[in-house]
Each structure stands twice: as C-alpha cells, then as structure tokens.
C-alpha cells in the first residue's frame, strides 16, 4: 500500500503542473541516463515543466505511481494529468511529432542534444 | 542472474498471441534488455498502454530481479 499522504501530494502535483517530470536527479544534474534523455527532449521543446527528484523517496514514490498510473519506473512524464510515458515513449513521440501535439507547441527543428557515449546504463528497477 | 532471452520472448508471445517479438541483450550484462514488439492487440492503444501490456507480461522477471530494465519499441503490425 502506498503512503496515503504522499499519494495525495503526488496527485496534487500532477494536477497543478500541466507538464510534470518525475526524474532521478534534477534537470540541471540528472542522475540517470533515461532521465537525462527526457530532460533533453523537454529542453528542445522549449516548454515549461515541473520536475520532481524521486531519489530521496524512490521506494515510496514507486508505490504511489504504481497505484496512480500502473507504472513503477522513472522517469515519468505527465502531461495534463496523464502519464505519457518514460524515456522510450517520450523520444518516440518526439520523433513522430506527437509530443509537440500533446504539449501544444511547435515541433522544434533541432533534434535534442545527443546523450553522452554509452556507459553502463543506470538501473531502472531495484 | 542473466535473463533467458528466449523465455522473455515466450512470455510476451504468450500474453499477446500473434505478436512478433524480438528481444536483445542491450549491454551484454543480461539484465538490461530491449524488445521490439509488433502486436495486433496494440491497435487503438496509446503507447503507454502498449508498454503496460508488455511489461505486465514479464512482470514476474522484474519482480524476481532477473531484469532491471526493458527498453520497448511497440508497433501495430501492418494488416
């Protein structure tokens, strides 16, 4: 069972932010390659978004998002209250133009910055 | 413990009859996998729901720690 108080806070955040990213680390300093990829896409879209660092409360937040969205891995991008997806989906939707449509912005001409060369990938699930 | 790619593929195929599934080991470590899944069941679903179906099929292997990450590419097969 997820913590009821935390769940309510998360629901309030999702409701209050049209574009909300749950990520490992911060947009300035992502602590996970998948989170960094989503930040790069959002930066390329030039859209305002809220970002929540999940690392300080990873396990309880997993339990909460499992209940809210049936999704336990981070990053998670919410747009207008709905979970859009993690890094794979966000990048695919960026490439197809669906993300720009969902965000209500113009598709940017520049592709998002490429991630650093492959390293050992970060763990998504404990 | 490294995941059995054949087993993962079979689990997805069992959950989505008629799907064509390809599973690869992304890093050589055996626990970060990537799968391409084309399934008729995806028709009309959002990407997140398509991914949910696949993740649900292999949930057990996430829970027992066999796989840590599964990158997904889902498509609806051309009919």
Image (tube, rainbow, N blue to C red):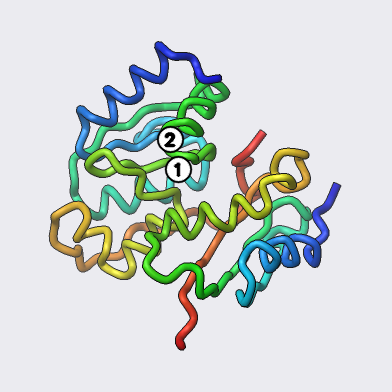
Q: As drawn, is B30 to the left or to the right of A93?
A: right
Which residue occupies the extreme bottom position in the image? Answer: B79
Q: What element carries label 1?
A: helix
Q: Quadrant of residue B7?
A: bottom right
Which residue occupies the extreme right position in the image? Answer: B1
Q: Which residue is drawn at 78% across and 46% down?
A: B66
Q: Which of A117/A79 is in front?
A: A79
Query: Mark 1 falls within which chain?
Result: A
Q: What element carries label 2?
A: strand
The N terminus of chain A lies in which quarter of the figure? top right
Q: Residue at x 36, y 44 (%)?
A: A83
Q: Is residue A78 above or below residue B52?
A: above
The C terminus of chain A lies in which quarter of the figure? top right
Q: Mark 1 points at which residue?
A: A35
Earlier residue among tags 2 and 1: 2
**Marks 1 and 2: in contact by CB < 8 Å?**
yes
Q: Mark 2 points at which residue?
A: A23
Q: In this view, does A48 lie above or below A90?
A: above
Residue A99 position, x and y percent, is: 27, 58
Q: Is residue B64 above or below residue A58?
A: below
């Amino acid at each position: 069972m997820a913590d009821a108080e935390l769940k309510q806070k998360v629901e309030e955040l999702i409701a209050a932010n049209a574009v909300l990213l749950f990520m490992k680390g911060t947009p300035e300093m992502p602590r996970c390659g998948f989170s960094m990829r989503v930040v790069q896409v959002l930066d390329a879209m030039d859209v305002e978004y809220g970002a929540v660092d999940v690392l300080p409360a990873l396990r309880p937040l997993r339990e909460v998002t499992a209940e809210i969205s049936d999704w336990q891995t981070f990053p998670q991008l919410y747009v207008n209250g709905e979970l859009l997806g993690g890094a794979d989906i966000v990048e695919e939707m960026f490439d197809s133009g669906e993300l720009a449509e969902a965000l209500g912005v113009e598709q940017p001409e520049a592709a998002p910055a490429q991630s650093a060369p492959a390293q050992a990938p970060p763990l998504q699930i404990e | 413990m490294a995941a059995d790619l054949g087993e993962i593929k079979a689990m997805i195929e069992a959950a989505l009859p008629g799907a064509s599934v390809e599973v690869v080991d992304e890093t050589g470590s055996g626990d970060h996998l990537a799968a391409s899944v084309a399934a008729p069941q995806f028709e009309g679903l959002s990407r997140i729901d398509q991914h949910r179906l696949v993740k649900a099929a292999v949930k057990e292997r996430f829970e027992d720690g066999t796989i840590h990450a599964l990158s997904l590419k889902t498509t609806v097969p051309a009919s």
